[in-house]
Image: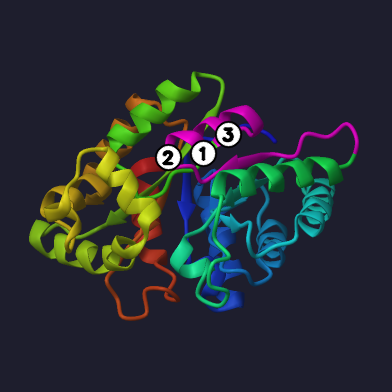
Amino acid sequence: MEALGPLGIWSRQLRYGDPAESLEAAAELDELGFDALWIPDVGAPVLDTVEALLAATRGAAVATGILNVWMHDPVEVAARHALLDERHPGRFLLGLGIGHAPLVDARQPGRYRRPLATMRAYLDSLDGHAPAGTAPARVLAALGPKMVALAGERTLGVHPYLVPVEHTRGVRAALGRDRVVAVALSVVLEPDRERARRIARVDLQPYLGLPNYTNTWRRLGYGDADLARGSDRLLDDLYAYGPPERVAERIADHRRAGADHVCLRVVTGRPDDAEHLPRAEWRVLAEALLG
């Protein structure tokens, strides 16, 4: 694909909000100058949403952040990827992830096993069913060192989520300069630090029960006290708080550590945060960060 560009938006709301408003918001984000739009996946037809977003925009890339490999047949994904590349050349990035055992095993206990081998086999199948002579654009949602190494061997790079700057620095050192590091940065546009922390702490709670994240944070030096309910230290390292100028500082920190692309996930603390499109916040960020 074409270069990803430095700044994007990661949005659950673009996937799960009102479909008509989501497409309107995507077009606006494109016009505002964001380089990429990232959407998550829980096994439903995520590539249908990708196609709709690509059709609604003209320049921004659209990426999955991430497509869960346990929930999608690789043969079908390879075929859809080829079709999207044909219809929207250079604008689709397939972010792949191994997911989390508590979620994958919820309906089929014991299904989640050998994550590295599973991801390698999935990539083998994608490669085997891609059109001859093509190089479909992919990244992995890699957190641990073995998955990061696989991403460097087999894809364009990595898409880490909920990680501090130190993780970005380590990933860049592991991958070298010729792989993409596209970091998702969670943002709370709340000037009062304690209120921002309260919003972030509520947002973080579901992730504290997912070993892929907690193991990563432990490798980076966070302990039981940090992970019990989200210490101020952990929150301050994972989230960017305050006015857009402070967000810009954290983006700059990740870029100095080696990130090529930072996609911003706005956390508002609203009861309907998963569906409400934070368009006012996106406009404020665009004005401050994109001029």
Mark 1: secondary structure? helix
Q: Residue at x 29, y 76 (%)?
A: 270
10 Å crowding of disc 3: few (<14), some (14-19), many (20+): some
The circle drawn on residue 150 is 3
Q: Which amino acid does label 2 sit on?
A: Gly
The circle drawn on residue 144 is 2
Quarter of the figure that contains the N terminus: top right
Give percent across and percent down for residue 78. 79, 51
Q: Give the range drawn in magenta.
A: 132-157
Label 3 to label 2, Cα distance in Å? Answer: 10 Å
Q: In this view, does 238 lie to the left or right of 18?
A: left
Q: What residue type is labelled 3?
A: Leu
Q: In this view, does 244 lie to the left or right of 77?
A: left
Mark 2: secondary structure? loop
Q: Residue at x 47, y 62 (%)?
A: 101
The circle drawn on residue 76 is none
